[in-house]
Amino acid sequence: MKKLLFSLLTLSMALVITGCKDGNKDGKRLLMVTEATFPPYEYRDDNGDISGIDPEIIREVARRNNMDVVIEDMKFNSVIAAVQTGKADVAASGITVTEERKQMVDFTIPYVSAAQVILVKKGAVIARVDDIRGKRVGVQHGTTGDTYVTEKYQEPERFDNAALVVAALNAGKIDAAVLDDAPAKVFLQENPGLKKLDEPLTEEFYAFAISKERKDLLEMFNRTMQEMRADGTLDEIIKRNMEKEISPPVNREDLPWWGKVKYDFRKNFIAGKRYMYLARGFVITLEVAGASVVLGVLIGFLIAIIRSTADQTGKLKFADMLCKVYLTVIRGTPVVVQLLIIYFVIFGAFDVDKVLVAILAFGLNSGAYVAEIIRGGIMSIDRGQMEAGRSLGLSYNKTMALVIVPQALKNVLPALGNEFIVLLKETSVAGFIALEDLTKAGDIIRSQTYNAFMPLVAVALVYLAVVMLFSYLLTIVEKRLKKNE
Ligand code: ARG
């Protein structure tokens, strides 16, 4: 027995180890970080996807090297730190090459030249660059515009993105906005009340930033970018995006409260068809919960019969013992752990459908609770009924099936309904095995929109609606059963 246990343990450990190795083998992913309110370099298109010159170049570089790009949107003053600390592979965010930044990261060959320009309201007193001295100047936090104004003039007003700087200028909160030339052009299109000063503040060029520890990656970028320059791809991408009509990002902050709600709603559910995550997740949650409740009831029923039979007749002793072990183990450990064990240990070496794994895990788990519910129901039926049945000449099995069980089931119906409600919500941990159920769907949206409120509330409302509908159906069934009496 001990030997058997030991070999089972080693076997499962071996499976875990192979399972883990399998999960990590994608080294072909290129994580790009950016701040995506900077058209035409990076911005969210109508689908909510990040488009523009930078993502296009990076995608092409990756494509030519058989890699997949994942883009993460963050504050501009974090993008360089993200590659420096190894959290990301490349920062592509209209980043100006500067001496200070070169101390922290490596830069690829530059791909475009740019300038910091000044926007003011038409008819403003500021006519030349030096006129911004002593004025309220707005910049995007952490940009070269920020550094330049701070060092050469005075403390500027720092905003999280260029769109906010322009909005502040429009609202008269600042006298001048400093930003990069190409984005300034996009913002000017939609703000006819603003104009650009002819004289630029600085001249600069952009490159991608890569960790100093990743010389191989830097080399790969430079080689591919040179290729793309030689075959015209680089210029084509830049020219096409520069000429494209892009509507500048809206400023959520400038909207009235209902406008903000509408904006968030669009962003979280409509843009990029994100509602599809919820729809697909909902179906998976129902599938898993529905199938596992059936499995659970089957298992539970079987166990309850075995155990009460053993109890009343003294037969089935061995089966009874097995049932007890099952109940103890299942009820004594968290369902997430069981799910993980089934997925990584038991099926670690096979490629099984995650939905099936989840159904199995939740069904096995629920079975233990259902077993006790049903057993409780059977025990609640007066012993006299069994005796009566037997003395009428019915066998033990017949009495069980015709007299005891039907009554028991009716008695435990509310408890079973409750079990389904618990189970439905418990499936929300399915995301642990990367199954995209309803909860995970909300989480995916949250990770894309950086908005916790809308996706989480939406997910909660869907669960609530299902539970309410189910409870309602259950009361109807109960009423019917009562009538039948
Ligand atoms: N070129 C400027 C800099 O490097 C501003 C870049 C801002 N980029 C952005 N994606 N918001 O400091």
Image: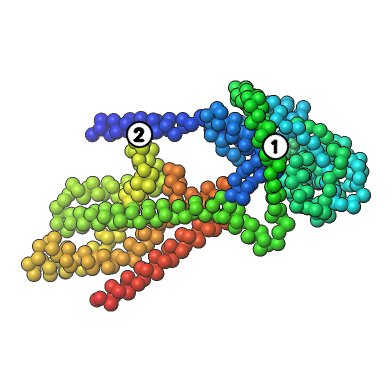
Figure label count: 2
Ligand 1 is within 8 Å of the C-beta of the residue at disc 2 = no
* Kind of residue at badge 1: Lys
Query: Can you identify the residue that label 1 sits on?
Result: 239
Q: Measured from the top left, where is residue 365 in percent x and y?
A: 34, 50
> Helix or strand or loop: what does disc 2 sit on?
loop
Q: Nearer the viewer, mark 1 or mark 2?
A: 1
State the quadrant of the N terminus. top left
Q: Is residue 27 left or right of residue 333?
A: right
Q: What's the residue at 23%, 68% (across, down)?
A: 407
Q: Residue 349: which disc? A: 2
Q: Nearer the viewer, residue 92 or 429?
A: 92
Q: What's the residue at 64%, 46% (across, down)?
A: 44
Mark 1 to mark 2 CA distance (whole Å): 50 Å
Q: Measured from the top left, where is residue 228 in percent x and y?
A: 63, 27
Q: Nearer the viewer, residue 62 or 226?
A: 226
Residue 342 in view here? yes
Residue 172, by quadrant, is bottom right
Q: Measured from the top left, where is residue 266 in percent x and y?
A: 60, 56
Q: Is residue 189 left or right of residue 371?
A: right
414 vs 314: above or below: below
Q: Quadrant of ligand 1?
A: top right
Going from N to C along the chain, the mark reached first, 1 or 2, is 1
* Kind of residue at badge 2: Ala
Q: What's the residue at 30%, 74% (across, down)?
A: 480
Residue 361 in view here? no
Q: Nearer the viewer, residue 292 or 127?
A: 127
State the quadrant of the C terminus. bottom left
C-beta proximity under 8 Å, tags 1 and 2: no
Task: State the scheme by which the image is colored.
Answer: rainbow
Q: Characterize the local packing of mark 1: few (<14), some (14-19) or many (20 or more) Cα atoms within 10 angstroms.
A: few
